[in-house]
Every structure is written in structure tokens, then in C-alpha cells.
Image (cartoon, rainbow, N blue to C red):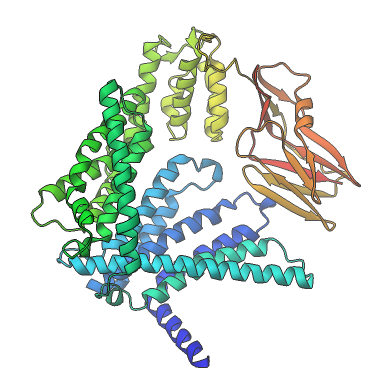
Amino acid sequence: MLKKFREISGKTGFIAREYPMVLLMAFLAAISLMCFAHGNFNSNGNYFVFIRFSLVCCLGISLMFALKMLSQRIGKAFLLEILGTVFLIFFYLLLPEKEKDFTEKYAFILVPTFILSHLLVSFAAFFGKNRELNFWQYNKNLFINVVLTAIFTGVLTGGVELAILAVDKLFDFNFNQKYYAETFYLLSVFGSCMIFLLFSENGLHDLEKNGSYPLILKFFTQYILIPLLIIYAVILYFYSAKILINWELPRGWVSYLILAYSVVGILALLLVHPLKENSTKSWVKMFSRIFYYTLIPLIILLFTAIFTRILEYGYTEPRYFVLLIALWLTAVVLYFIFAKKPTIKFVPMSLFAFGLFSLIFPYLNTFSVAKRSQKTELHNILIQNNLLENGKIAFNKKVSDTVADEVSNKFEFLAKRNEKEFLLNLLPEKNKKLIAKNLNEANFWGIRSDFRNQFKNVQYDISKKELSPVQKNVTLIAKKFDADISGYKYLFKAYNYKYNSFEFDNNTVELKMPVSMFKSELNLIFNGQKINLVPDLKKLFENYPNNGEIKVDDLFITKVIGNYEFKMMFDSVILSKTADTKDQFLINSESVLILIK
């Protein structure tokens, strides 16, 4: 036992010396997430910095590992680590400082960047030289190590969490619930990184050396993955025949199925790559030979589905990425059909190149294309419906509800992409103030709602069965949001879009702020007792008109629960009223103040 402990300690020390930057990134990410889980952010609105920092550090784990693999091939480890650190600092500064500014635009930066960093791991050490088999062995071993790491980390994390729970319940320690989240972050981030590096120990030397082909992988690919792909190919071909017979446009959903079939099919071929000339099953050989040819009709169907949506609604980031993957898939198919000596390295390298192009290439990157396209679409809709007068939107003209909704959606889309100047130039002076306020405060829900409400002559087509009845929004806004704490003993701040829990006098009060509109429940939980606040929210609107924006002196709810009085203060609340559905509410503010006495 002591010998084994010394062996593990020795390996751990070796890993710490060999992969210091990888471990540092994992440690900082884990600590940042633990601070986020542990901290009391009710008096500090800057808690988002921990999420921002942890995202960058998590990105740094894969990036630093890729650079380490490259340095083991070419040297210059210190220079590569400096360059990697500079990139991470730049990426950190690229992310917004406040959570409310973190729109879906940043998701389209983060997700592709994380994918690119992992793709870089797969080929960073294999530029130039023809190391086909070594490249395959390296990625096969990485794949196996990732699977083993997931299993080991899952067992370790679950076991430790269960042990803490057992001690807590059996010995009445009454641990703070935050300890479970902190333990999870530490083990799932830093622990998983340590386990993965233990499996990868000597790095490139161990990962690329020849080894026997895993029988489980062979069985999975031959008898499960490829047969499933054949079934999906048959389904897609029958659907293509249906389209031709009925002479109809393909459904948009089919593009995702074709992409999934194509990507998984390429992965299956990569998995059996060393066996393609050996005595594998004949139908596997046949699939390997004809797979890329079977993709040609499906790619035509894919482009038809993609451009059907793009020509109708214009480019958005998701449509851009779907088109980009379709172009990459076309390049892969043409390469493996026509190249005399194709290499499997082309797959990750080409995908990395396409992904990098989508993020940084001037004028043609995803964000530039999406913004230009939606600006054009917005202008075209306004012109086609005669909604422009002297370059400004004429809100008093007749407009159908579908057009009003479409214009509002595109206005919100561009607002989230910081096109403030462009949008304000479209507005008459009398309509600018409210919209400009929402733009400055990054209140994107308010932007869409307030912009939609500017249309004063909306026509509803009642012949459309799927049409929703007229929707009216009432927005209550507190003229002042100052908390008069006289007479109150405790003050807590509950943040929107998250679960809030506070403790006082050996009591616990919880408030889960919903991420969207809610109808029947907004529960304040006091020592496990649920108190629904929706009836009280309805009372706030009883003495006001059923439409428009209304400024009120105070906006709060008071509830007496047990020996305590709770006062919930709101900055703004929206009531959405329709004829055939229940009233819906939205807490239209960053936070809610809870006073207790």
C-alpha cells in the first residue's frame, strides 16, 4: 500500500512539473467556480467576474494542453505558453463585464472557440510530417483517456459527495449546502484534469505509440455505429424521394439530421481507419468505400434546406454555422473522393480552418454577415410594407401583427449586437427616448416589448387559426428604488435568473427568480413553506389601465409569515394579458430587494 502511494505521489509530482500551466488553468477555474458557489453576492453585483474568469480558465486547459503537445514535438515551450497566456488575457477582455450584457452573441464566440481549442489538441503535434498511424493512435488514446477520465471523475465525485452527505446526516453536522457545489467544482474540474494527465503521463511519447486496436471500439463501430448510420441513410434517401415525388421544399429540421449523419459517419470511418485494409466485415469495407459518394445527394438536399431558410429570413449566427459546416462537409467529401493519397488529418485541420475563418475573417465572419443580413432584412420589410417616412419608421401606419412581430424581433436581434446608432437612426425623435434608455441599460426584453408597443395601428388577421389573440402588455415601473429600511432588521438582494437562498435567525428564505415569463407560481420559500406571490402581483395591476407603461411611486409586496413581515421591492414588473390564456408576468429588473422584520 505504501509503495503504491509513493508511486502515485511520484507520478503526481512528475505531472505537476510536466504540465504546470494546464494544472494552473484547472486550479484557477475550480477556485473561481467555488468562489461563485460560496460567495454572498447580495451586496456585490460583480459576481459575474467569477463565471467570466472560470470560462477563460476552462478554455485555457485544452489550449495549454495543445501547446504542450506541440512543444514536445518542436520545443519552445516557454514561448508557446506566453503566447497562450496572451491569448487568454485577450479573450477575457473580450467577454462582457456584466451578466446582463452576456447575450447569445457571446455563446457564438465561446462554443466555437472551445471546439477549436479541442480540435487543436487533436492535430497540433502533427503538422507537416506524414505520421498517419501515429496521428490515429494519438487521437485514439486521447479518446480512451477522456472516457476513462469521465468514469473515474464521476465515481470519485459521486463517492465524495455521498461521503459528505453521510457524515452530515449521521453526525448532525448540518453542513452548508454550498459545500456540495464547491466539492463538485473542485473534483469535476481540477480533479478530472489531474486524472486525465495521469492517464496521459508522458504526453506525446505515450499517446502516439503503437498499440493493439481495442476490441470494444471495433465491436461498437462495426456492429452498432455503422448499422445505425445505414438505417439513417435509408431514412434520408426515402425522404429525398418523397420530396421529389411531391415536388416540395425540404423541412428545415432535415439539415440537422443530415449533418449529424455526415459527422457521425466520418467519425465512424476514422475509428476503423487502421482496419480498412484488414479482414474486417465485408459490409464495413463496402460502407467505407461508398460513404462519401452517398453524401453527395444528401449535401444537395442540405444546401436546399439551408438556403430555403436563408433566402426567406436572412443570415443569423446559427444559420451561418450550419452553412459553414455544410461547406466543410462538401470540402471533406471532395477531398476523399478525388485526392490520390488522402490523409485523415485533413478532417480536424480543415474543420479548424473553417471555424477560425468564421470567427476572425474580416467582413465574412459570422457576426459581420449576420448583422449585415439582418439590417438588410429589416430595411426590406420596412420598405415592402411602406413603414418608412423620410428614413424613419412610421409607427402610426397600418401594419399586420406578423410584420410588427418580425420587425420587433429583428430590432431586438440588432440591439443585442450593439447596433445602437443604426437602430436609433430609424426612430422618430418622439420614440427615441424610451428605446435609447433600454439600449443604454441593455434591457433587451424591454427593448422588444417597448418597440412592439410603438405600433399604434396593428391589424390582426382573425382568419389564421394559429394566430394568438391580441396581447397587451402593462409595465409598472417604480419611480424610485430606494429601500426605506427603517423598522426592518434584514435586507437581502435576490438576483434575477438565479436561485437565491438566505439565512437569518436560524431561518432560511429562498426565492427562485424565473428565467422567462411565468403564469401561476412565483414561490417565496420560508423554512420549506411555499408562499405563492402571483396573487399579490395581480393586485399590483388592479388600479391601472390594461396597456402601456405606467410609473408608480412604489412597487412592492408585503407578506406576513409566522412572526416575520417580508417586503419584496421591485424595480419593474410586466403583465402580459391575452384573451385565451392566463396572465403572464415578468420580473423586468436585475434584482429584487427583500426586507424582513
Q: How far from the left and from the top, in percent, is residue 29? A: 50, 63
Is 213 positioned to the left or the right of 57 in the image?
left
- Return the residue found at the far front: 282
- Is the residue 179 above or below the residue 507 in the image? below
- Return the residue found at the far left: 340
Q: How far from the left and from the top, in percent, is residue 24? A: 46, 70
* Residue at point 59%, 15% (across, down): 469
- For residue 70, say whether it is visible: yes
- For residue 26, say whether it is visible: no
In this orientation, which residue lies closer to the viewer: 272 or 509?
Answer: 272
In this orientation, which residue lies closer to the viewer: 318 or 161?
Answer: 161
* Residue at point 45%, 73% (across, down): 195
- Is the residue 285 above or below the residue 397 in the image? below
Name the quadrant containing residue 347.
bottom left
In this orientation, which residue lies closer to the viewer: 454 or 537?
Answer: 537
Q: How far from the left and from the top, in percent, is residue 271? A: 28, 60
Is 130 positioned to the left or the right of 379 in the image?
left
Is 131 positioned to the left or the right of 543 in the image?
left
* Residue at point 69%, 51% (across, down): 43
Q: How far from the left and from the top, in percent, is residue 168? A: 74, 69
